[in-house]
Image (cartoon, grey):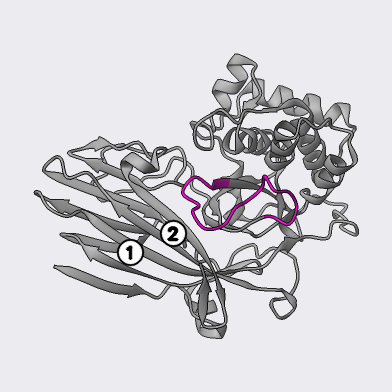
Amino acid sequence: MKRRSFFKLVGSGAAAAALFPVIGRTAALPLSQAKWRGYQLTYQITLPSAGKTARLWLPLPDTSETVYQFTQGSNWSGKTNNSAFYMLPGTLSPVFYADWKGEGERTVKVSSIIKTADRSVDLRFYQASAKAAPIPPAFKRYLQPTSQIPLDNAVKKLALSITSQANARTPLQQARAIYDWVIDNVAYDNNLRGQGRGDLRSMLSRENFSGKCADIHTLFVGLARASGIPARMQNGIRINDSSLNKNLGNYGDVSTSQHCQAEFYLSGLGWVPVDPSDVAKVMALESAPHNVESISQLREKLFGSWEMNWVAFNDGENVDLGKGCAAGKLPFFAYPHAEIDGRQQDSLTPESFSYKITSALLVGTGAKL
């Protein structure tokens, strides 16, 4: 039986604020001054017909109403035995779940409407208080180690070495020193599949600081946390061309455009966006040295801003999808995840999974496909 349903994710005004309180809203342009762009993000899924049971999980745009992104709703259509929208525990990060039993059609289409506005935090006049402010309880989990991001002596020793050599004393100075060190010392490896592994322990044990965005931002986040600065990664997907560089986004078929960003927390200001991975990526793909003007400008631009041709899904680490997921906890959740008779499908090969993810720019009442 084919079904179609609509999941209202966020409201507007006071009612939405009451239903979805926002913790740590980032300092940036007021909503009325932001230049918003509307998009439709669509998954088209067709799973193999083999096996007795199949299960599917899709990450959807985060519903935390921020000054750079808000989500208006999602709908789905297709033929399933069971389906549901639900939130990752303790978050406003939605997931679409579906399962199938027996042979037959295993297809589903899920679409979300999102609006984004470029995000920028002005750090020029930020002054840390003379007395270190306590970190609010809601942010303390972003100081904790995980299986992917240990905070052992090796990580702490490296973090201290970086901040000491830069004579960085305040959290802002320390975060900037770590950001610059990461850019100067990582090698972006475009041959890796997906976003990389995001495994800091492995990077340190191999003394090999190379990888893609998950690896590079795991390194930044781990070093920041080891310095006492709350930090996190945001998993998501690029949905449009970039105005900064041709290598930093595309439009239409975005099946392989998953990308994670990084943030660190400053007392009295909130979350500060950074993206050292994209600086490293442009250097690698254009064979550009660190000191060329275009790279220097990009380095400055991406310390304190995100170009929102990108949509955030979640900041999950060691994500438990529940709903009978046989894979256990995922290191991060940015790709479609499917299992047939408990065997995980390869999320990094859209053509055999199979899935297609598309973005469309909303213009007036229609979509620019």
For label 1, count other residues whose C-alpha is less than 10 Å away and answer few (under 14), some (14-19) or many (20+). Answer: many
* Magenta residue check for 324: no
What is the residue that sits farthest to the front in this orientation? Answer: 369
In the image, 304 versus 213, the foreground residue is 213
* Residue 315 rendering spot, x and y as whole percentages: 53, 50
Report the span colored magenta: 242-259
Q: Is residue 185 left or right of residue 201?
A: right
* Residue 15 rendering spot, x and y as whole percentages: 50, 84
Q: Secondary structure at mark 1?
A: strand
Label the magenta part by its dominant secondary structure.
Answer: loop
Residue corresponding to mark 2: 60
Residues at badges 1 and 2 in contact (C-beta under 8 Å)?
A: yes
What amino acid is found at the position of numbered circle 2 in the picture?
Leu
Q: Secondary structure at mark 2?
A: loop
What is the residue that sits farthest to the top in this orientation? Answer: 206
The image quarter containing residue 291 is top right
Query: Residue 85 has which mark?
Result: 1
* Residue 98 rendering spot, x and y as whole percentages: 25, 56
For the residues labelled 1 and 2, the Cα–Cα distance comes to 9 Å
The image quarter containing residue 241 is bottom right
In the image, 345 versus 209, the foreground residue is 345
Label whose residue precedes the other's in the sequence (1 or 2):
2
